[in-house]
Image (cartoon, rainbow, N blue to C red):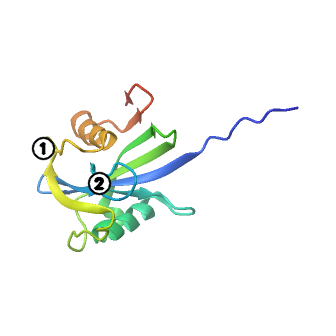
Amino acid sequence: MVSKKPVPSILVAVYLFLFRDGQVLMLRRHNTGYEDGSYSVIAGHVERDERITQALVREALEEAGVRLYEEDIRFLHVMQRTNPDGLIYVDFFFAAERWQGEVLNREPSKCDDLRWFRLTDLPENTIPYVREVLMNHWVNQSSFSEYGWGTLYQR
């Protein structure tokens, strides 16, 4: 009998750092079942048959009520990470400094705080891998990392 190797399952997510006046927009997760009480940024899963940049534009509108244009976003970083629950992700991080509309909490059932923070004064309860990308991109200009396997690889 031939044994079958399990096919790896990788989830894809997008993250958006909105920057204004030297600050980044952060959202505190609430009632989601994942990292509740911690700060992150606009983020979400890429849906089936959806381009990564489309997902980013969709999430910005859904979560913060802002309209992005693909030409106004720039790629920052890609991370492969594993969660304590065993799920493996490939995360794409982008930044934007221009958008249309006023930033507002469009998902109050999933977010109980939305505000701007200086990179030098991020909340202590920022999700660790989000903090890692913010710090490493701006300090080291790294574009790739692996996170959650016990060591951090950056390049």
Q: From the viewer's perspective, is residue 46 above or below residue 142?
A: below
The residue at which mark 1 appears reads as 121
In the picture, the disc for residue 101 is none
Residue at image coords 25%, 55%: 28
Tag 2: residue type? Val
In the picture, the disc for residue 41 is 2
Residue at image coords 45%, 39%: 83
Residue 19 placement (x, y as % from top left): 20, 56
C-alpha span from label 1 to label 2: 15 Å
Sequence order check, earlier mark of 1 and 2:
2
Q: Quadrant of the N terminus?
A: top right
- The quarter of the picture where residue 20 lies is bottom left
Residue at image coords 59%, 45%: 9
Residue 127 placement (x, y as % from top left): 30, 44
Tag 1: residue type? Asp
Q: Quadrant of the C terminus?
A: top left
Q: Tell me the crowding category of disc 1: few under 14, some 14 to 19, or many 20 or more residues within 10 angstroms, Cα based.
A: few
- The quarter of the picture where residue 18 lies is bottom left
Residue 101 placement (x, y as % from top left): 23, 74
- The quarter of the picture where residue 5 lies is top right
Residue 12 placement (x, y as % from top left): 49, 51
Q: In terms of depth relative to the viewer, which is nearer, 155 or 91?
A: 91
Lateral position of residue 48 relative to residue 19, left or right: right
Tag count: 2
Q: From the viewer's perspective, is residue 121 above or below residue 43?
A: above
Evaluate if marks 1 and 2 touch, with contact meaning CB atoms under 8 Å apart: no
Residue furthest to the top in view is 151
Q: Secondary structure at mark 1?
A: helix
Q: In terms of depth relative to the viewer, which is nearer, 89 or 143?
A: 89
Q: Tell me the crowding category of disc 2: few under 14, some 14 to 19, or many 20 or more residues within 10 angstroms, Cα based.
A: many
Lateral position of residue 41 relative to residue 146, left or right: left
Q: Secondary structure at mark 2?
A: loop
